[in-house]
Amino acid sequence: MGYVEFTREMKRDYTILVPNMLPMHFEMIVQVLRNYGYHLDLLRSSGHKIADTGLKYCHNDACYPAILVIGQFIDALQSGKYDPHKTALIMFQTGGGCRASNYIFLIRKALEKAGYGYVPVISLNLLGLEKHSGFQLTPSKLIRMVYALILGDLLMTLVNQTRPYEVEPGSARELAARLTRELADEMAQKKVTYFWVRKACGRVIQAFRQLPVAPQEKVRVGVVGEIYVKFSPLGNNNLEDFLVSEGAEVSMPGLLDFFMCSCWCHMMDFKLYGMRKREYLLQKIMLRYLMHKQRDQIQMLKQAGYHAPTPFLHVTELVEGYIGIGTEMGEGWLLPAEMLELYESGVKNIVCAQPFGCLPNHICGKGMMKPLKEKNPGMNIVAIDYDAGATVVNQENRLKLMLANARENQEAQKSQSA
Amino acid sequence: MDFLGLDIGSTTAKAVLVRGGKVIYQKYDRHFSRVRERARELVEEVRQLIGGERIKVAVSGSAGLGLAEAAEVPFVQEVFATSEVVKRKAPETDCVIELGGEDAKIIFFDGGIDQRMNGTCAGGTGAFIDQMATLLNVSVGELDALSLNHSRIYPIASRCGVFAKTDIQPLLNQGARKEDVAASIYQAVVNQTIAGLAQGRRIRGNVLFLGGPLYYCKGLRQRFCETLELDEQHACFPEYGRFAVALGAAMYAEKNGLETDCDALIARFDRCKNVGAGRGNLKPLFENEAQHAEFAARHGKNDVPRGEISAYTGEAYLGIDCGSTTTKLVLLGRDDEILYSYYASNRGAPVEIVKEQLEKIYALGGERIRIVGSAVTGYGEELIRNAFGVDCGIVETIAHYTAARHFQPDVDFILDIGGQDIKCFRIKNGAIDSIMLNEACSSGCGSFLETFAHAMGMSIEEFARRGLYGAHPADLGSRCTVFMNSSVKQSQKDGATVEDISAGLSISVVKNALYKVIRVGSAQELGRHVVVQGGTFLNDAVLRAFERELGLEVVRPAIAGLMGAYGAALYSKKCRTSSLISPEELKGFTHTATSAVCGGCMNHCHLTVNRFGGRKYISGNQCARGAGQSAGETDLPNLYAFKREYLTGLKSGPARRGTIGLPLALGMYELLPMWHAIFTSLGFQVQVSGLSTRHTYELGQFSIPSDTACYPAKIMHGHIEELIDQGVDAIFYPCLTYNVDEHGGDNHYNCPVVAYYSELLQGNVERLQHMRFLYPYLNINNASRLARGLMQCLHAWRPEISRGEMRAAVKAGLAAREAYVQAVRREGEKAVAIAREKGKRIMVLSGRPYHIDPEINHGIDKLAASLGFAVVSEDSVCHLAAKPEVQVLNQWTYHARLYRAAEFAAENPDVELVQLVSFGCGVDAITTDEVRAILERRGKFYTQIKIDEITNLGAVKIRLRSLIGALEEKNHGIC
């Protein structure tokens, strides 16, 4: 399998385009990488033409996230804003038995088809699936990207918990945007250490606490699902905004869980099958490290009176009796685990977002709903499929049903306790 | 105070006015997409009744959503509204089934309320029934009346409307009784509701049926009651069934409604007249009439010579194209001039139409014209050929190619969009280089436009004409027709006009053909001389959209809709004398159709027996046996049959330690010899569920949670039920993240569905929870690991099994597996040798191991054999070729075989590859392009067959015959 390498020489004057999945997280990750001398540009394009462009160059039955990412890349290359001969693309590659591992290749094929076969596509992965001499994932880069992740998760959590109650509409998001910018700038200036991250976290929490809010009753709605459509407003037709506009407080388990789960799944290969012994140790160390960071975050959030994420190890225990923890493709067992995590923390209303025809979600999403609902009374789940052809009307109508039930359940509970 | 509930669904608008707990006004009406106007009219009527009295109002329904937002009237979600009504009016209800225009819902009340709505891909509702009625050329009322007189039910795919259509159309063309088809349509709706919505929960107890279709269609009620085994006490069809949602909205209004009066409400509706900023951003098809005139003039030049039938004397040639929705006839004179032509919908009765037309031709031509050659093509080819003694039948791809080449000898690319099919040919060096056909699931073609035009209350011509000048064509997406329907709904909400929608639909049809079927990246790929044809291209809006999307001027023959018949007529010029039915014989022509079930094998094909006077033609059969002939394929090797025999012939020992059931589905098809040997050697009696039938699927359809999963996965539920019924002590289907490592790729994964389906079964098949279901996570590539895993898994049940015993069993299992692999490979080599000796073509029918199941492949292997191919499977020949270079991550065991099998086909001139793809197989979105690339690199044809529940092999036959036709044409040239 040949591919265009991103060489050391390219590093000097190439612009690397980054697809946008989580605005806050990615902005800081991009900033981290800039510190290593790369020129990066985070794509912010949206609208119909992204999916249209994607459909044009990619097999129409490919996953919706692939279609969007390809659409976004090719749209950018065709926009005239970049010199295609001085541009590279970067994509996160998960590996594993899900077809998502093939995104990188679908992107390359689409580029070929669109006449950009010479544009290098950098695979960002932890498994050494590909080598690019101009872009190597060193431990120092990796750790700093993790810091960006931590801060991103924190900002996201705080925005979600503040936004429905803000006195000044839009103030929570503005604050987050300002903080994102500031933190990104600081990361550019100084050598980032975890000590700094902890202090920054404290500062972020403090800033949010000072934001004027008016307590009012909201229904809490959790969002879980396939990683891209769960987080990306482009992928889920601005799900978060819709829910907030309907008077809900959104709760989204963070990206850190996804990475911890990814470590966990690699460890399972050794535990269940005796494979990849060497990686096992490395993954174990990484998982420990991430869990430690998560613990800090939980502590800080709790102290400040916010809802905090559930410790990862506890999450792994929650799915017992529902699904085997060896279910590792896609989001795997993490998907039902996150629903249970939400339920346990009092969020009984859940949107499960997935691309149309998502393979692992047949099992881990739709396949788990019956037992989940049976064993957890009052769990109110709605599964929403996202696709280039699916319409917002249909999606919103189903969301409204979930919300109507949510409100009714809340009323019932209130009258019961009163 | 009165309470007004408005329910504006996708096709109808309902209003209910409640005063003092009693309904004092109700109305049910189609709204023809005029949502706001119709709502206003309803309120107008209410005003006439109650004048200026105060009311409280709330709106519900999918189309009401947008209106409520714009007019700032409280909205209540329709399922929520229904639940409220049922709780109040029929509290003893256990389950509600509500069918609407485009939505289907189920609400369970027993054991905690649980509401379900159909997902994105499920059109089996009111709109679907409408579409099917159009297809049968009857009204919905007539359809219902017909269904009550049925004598049998045909299996019709119920996954979605488009699929169902693919099954129904050929039934009609084969002459099935309309009564039976009507009832089968209803049955499809029922099956879809159960499989798509119940998702694992049984529908039982007191069932309440709501919604328009269930109120009007008695036949549909009957089908539901029979299928769910409900008696009169338990099936309730209340008088308010149509109005349940509106009633719920009125009840909601009582608490949370907007207090107003009718005038103020009307004013609100009027205010939001111009709402809808989200209009399409596409350019209009034509800026002005002059532009269109110039366009029309350019295309007007591409005509053929015509002759006068009333004046012509001499020999003539008849071409008939009996297509899926239309029937076309062309009569050619000796200089290829068209003497007579006919083009019209076949109204579900093609035999009648051809008879009428022949009568007409004979009447017009009299003694002067002598028809010396005739040919027929299209879906109804065999029926018409048998009915009227037509001389030859040709596959439609070849007919269309013949016609297009006659028109433009240096053609590079032909695109034909017909009623239901899209066919594309790439021509290189005067021969067909590749053929692309649409799948069942992208039938965004002519018949869709037509049905849609009818839904808007106009003819297709009128609809198309209005689309030419739509100022802001709506962007409707291109995935499938069901999706398009809801996109239309959305753009109407955004204020799109009929003109915009018509233009938008034309653009969608084109995009679907270009990006989904042809997978084109740029105009250059198609070449310089492109011919477009098929009835759909007579629509100027579609033609214009096509030229615009590609930026290329193309040729559209004036007879675009007749090209199949024209090609057939040209083809028939080979003939010297004709066996076509004579005018005298035609006078005494009769046609009757009866149905029967074939007893030739366990497939039990549903046959339609057509009788034309003394002659008989049988259709619906998957192999030659059904037609009363001996199974003529037996002398050619068929690896699919070999594998089936091998797997079903495995023998187990006595039940020393109990019985263990192995479901023969998904990955079990690959590893059965191994598990079978392991458990037999451990002293279990192994019971394997049999090969699947339609009945297997139906047994398990109640517990399928995801309606978009692949058919091979869905059928697994039936196998589990079968095993439980057999009373086995345990069922075993392991979770295998990794499949056998054959070193054929970069990794050796299973797909997520094959790997973890047990997890889903455990959660959704109720009866499994009361029995021993073993689904350990195992590593099958390491004997000691495997033994350890199995020990752990069996420990609780049979702790006495010793380590040594297990090791021996695993050893036996691995040996059995190896023996199977070698046997298949040996047989593959033998098949290749035999075929070569006999000078037969070899077909690698390449899919996954579970595609050998007769219910999953619907007998395609036998069909291929009957067409003269020696059939080999992918795993029987993949060892004969090297690992090819692929552009993707080659990480699944089954796919690695697929690539190598493709390489084998590419290397050998007498081997063709046909890829079987199950609908919904996400991984095949990746492999199909690669397999195509491997084959086309060496100048081979790529043929893909998408399979699902659809049982009709009509489309498959066309694909395989096209392949044969193209191969022959490449070798010898046609005509």
Image (cartoon, coloured by chain):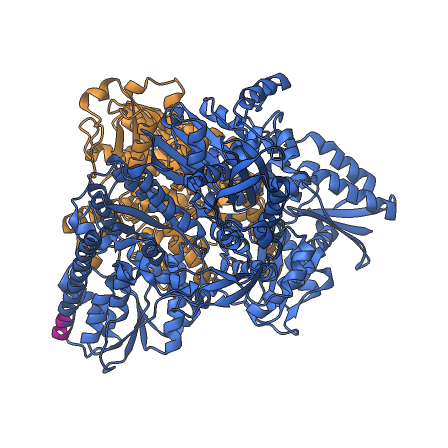
Q: Which residue: 29% across, 51% down?
A: B846
The colour applied to the residues of chain B in this rendering is blue
Q: Quadrant of residue B753?
A: bottom left
Dominant secondary structure, magenta: helix
Between residue A195 and residue A359, name the one nearer to us. A359
Chain letter of the orange region: A
Q: Which residue: 32% across, 17% down?
A: A83
| Magenta residue check for B806 | yes
Left or right: where B795 falls relative to B288: left
Q: Note whether B427 is above or below B883 in the view shown.
A: above
Q: Note whether B451 is above or below B725 in the view shown.
A: above
Quadrant in the picture for the C terminus of chain B: top left
Q: Which residues are magenta?
A: B803-808
Left or right: where B941 falls relative to B112: left
**x and y percent of residue B178 in the render?**
60, 58
Between residue A384 and residue B887, name the one nearer to us. B887
